[in-house]
Amino acid sequence: MTKKHVALIFGGNSSEHDVSKRSAQNFYDAILATGKYRITVFAIAQNGYVLDPERSKRILALEDERPIVADYMTTVDQQDPLSRINALRAAGDFDIFFPVVHGNLGEDGTLQGLFKLLNKPYVGAPLRGHAVSFDKVLTKELLTVNNIRNTKYIVVDEKTAKTLTWAQVVKDLGDVVFVKAANQGSSVGVSRAKTADEFEAALTDSFQYDYKVLIEAAVKGPRELEVGVIGNEAPIVSEIGAHHVPNQGDGDAWYDYNNKFVDNSSVQFEIPANLPDAVTAEVKDMALKAYKVLDLRGEARMDFLLDENNVPYLGEPNTLPGFTNMSLFKRLWDYSDIDNVELVDKLIDYGFAEFEKNAQLSYEFVSLGEEKIGKFN
């Protein structure tokens, strides 16, 4: 049997660059373990250039990336407008892209646009699903209009932020809020504020990462839940996972970047989450509904907050969830009787199926012929 050829892409120019490398290692091992595919790897350096497979594999093995990238750049004609992606030619005739690029490029729809232009199948959501879900404001607007419960919020840009007072924020959202850059991932550009000074500092931080900022009401006595969803038209949902950071119940901590990817030794995990049956059913139903509303495919992780009265609020989707050894998404499927090898096999199948379905759409057009312009009075 001829093995399908997978182009695994990782790295990127976002703050989650190193996270992507660790996720890619686990995906690479799982794809290889299926015995069904051959893999070519491509690293996207932090300067945005795609590297050749030989150098990319060294980066995947966690060699020091800086000299590898510097050496590659000596071979590049930077005047060539396609120089950033020229290395993709080295893959030859591959069958499907498997992106593992968290944050910018991978989760905002950029790479998916490239895949579509190249007319190649790829794993995961379409461009529009990624782009909408990556924008926290657009996500909340779609959730709200489709009656999927989420926290109250205010949106500001650099101009409107200057006229928004802390007193108005407290009146509308309460005396504890989270301030978030609209287009970032993994808790980057996110701050908790409970005073006017903290609020101003939080805005300053978030505006480093985006020109649009989301201000959200905090949930009282929160528990954080995560749910995995995979599939296309008939998605399936994983067991629900819960995690708790020390002092989170008092509102003085949350599941931040450090807890997610650097040191989660103090985080308490619970899979499946100990929840009343009705709450379990509601969370899973909300996750599936949001997956469809946001037009997602392949894979996603839905993050929830559960308040002190066991009322769930959908936080945000992650259209290319982390797959590191610390990632809860990876563990959720183990507890749902789908191991890593079976999971990647399903994701690749979903990618091929979505491509074949979209290939049936018509893109024919009617020729305009000779222009016949009407009269203007």
Image: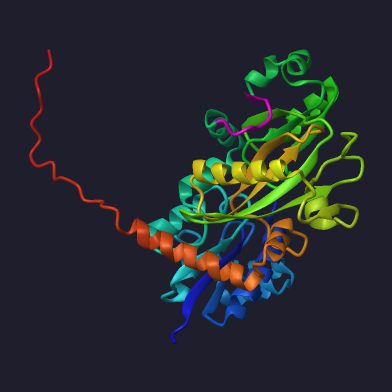
- Identified at 36% across, 58% down, the residue is 357
Residue pictured at 71% horizontal, 37% vertical: 312
| In the image, farthest residue toward the bottom | 1
Q: Residue at x 62, y 80 (%)?
A: 33
- For the point 79% across and 32% down, the residue is 309
Residue in the foreground of this view, choosing between 215 and 200: 215
Q: Which residues are magenta?
A: 147-156
Position of the N terminus, as image quadrant, is bottom left
Q: Is residue 250 left or right of residue 104?
A: right
Please indicate, yes or no, whether residue 170 appears anywhere in the rendered image: yes
Q: Quadrant of residue 230?
A: bottom right
Q: Is residue 193 above or below residue 259?
A: above
Q: Looking at the picture, how far across and down is residue 224, in whole percent?
A: 77, 43
Asked if the magenta segment contains residue 371, the reply would be no
x%, y% of residue 93? 41, 75
Q: Is residue 150 magenta?
A: yes
Q: Position of residue 350 (x, y in %)?
A: 48, 63
Which residue extends farthest front? 277
Q: Position of residue 72 (x, y in %)?
A: 60, 70
Quarter placement of the C terminus: top left
Q: Nearer the viewer, residue 220 or 15?
A: 220
| In the displayed structure image, the side of residue 138 where residue 58 appears, left or right | right
Q: Is residue 19 left or right of residue 89?
A: right
